[in-house]
Image (cartoon, helix red, strand yellow):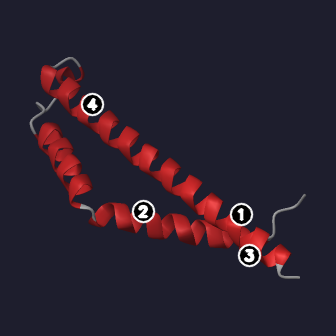
Amino acid sequence: MTIPIWFLNAIRQRLDLIMLDIERQSEWRKIRAEERSAFAGMFPGEDKMKGADYMEWEDKHLFRRAVENEWLYTQGVKDGIQLIIGIMKEGNSK
């Protein structure tokens, strides 16, 4: 089964809207601010990979990414369910 281009474009547009929504949420802004603060606290130079500041930043960065991915997954499931319901309603009305 080939997926139509219009459908792929609709999915891409929906993902873009979800990412914009994520950017606006205060919880996300707080997590990103913590990540930026931890990153700014790192030392300049090559030793930053070994320093505690780098590890703190990396922990916050990975946590932010995990939360973001979880939110995207959850939203994708919700959107998928809505799509299936819409298709089923359309099929039943014919």
Q: Which is closer to the viewer, label 3 or label 4?
A: 3
| Depicted 66 relative to depicted 48: above or below | below
Residue 26 falls left or right of residue 42: right
Q: Amino acid at mark 3?
A: Trp
Q: In the figure, residue 47 lies in which quadrant?
A: top left
The Cα–Cα distance between marks 2 and 3, rounded to whole angstroms, is 20 Å
Give the mark, 3 or 1, whose residue is nearer the N terminus.
Answer: 3
Residue position marked by numbered label 3 in the rendering? 6
- The crowding category of the residue bearing disc 1, from other C-alpha atoms within 10 Å (few below 14, some 14 to 19, many at least 20), is few
Give the mark, 2 or 4, whose residue is nearer the N terminus.
Answer: 2
As helix, strand or loop, the secondary structure at mark 2 comes to: helix
**Residue 36 or residue 20, whichever sits in front:** 20
Give the mark, 3 or 4, whose residue is nearer the N terminus.
Answer: 3
The Cα–Cα distance between marks 2 and 4, rounded to whole angstroms, is 22 Å
Q: Which is closer to the viewer, label 1 or label 2?
A: 1
Residue 23 falls left or right of residue 39: right
Dot 2 and dot 4 residues touching (CB under 8 Å): no
| Residue 9 image offset from top left, x and y in percent | 66, 72
The Cα–Cα distance between marks 3 and 1, rounded to whole angstroms, is 17 Å
Counting the numbered discs, the total is 4
Q: Residue drawn 52% across and 48% down?
A: 73
- The crowding category of the residue bearing disc 3, from other C-alpha atoms within 10 Å (few below 14, some 14 to 19, many at least 20), is few
Q: Which is closer to the viewer, label 3 or label 1?
A: 1
Residue position marked by numbered label 2 in the rendering? 19
Residue position marked by numbered label 1 in the rendering? 84
| Residue 62 image offset from top left, x and y in percent | 34, 34
Q: Residue drawn 49% across and 50% down?
A: 74
| Residue 52 image offset from top left, x and y in percent | 14, 20
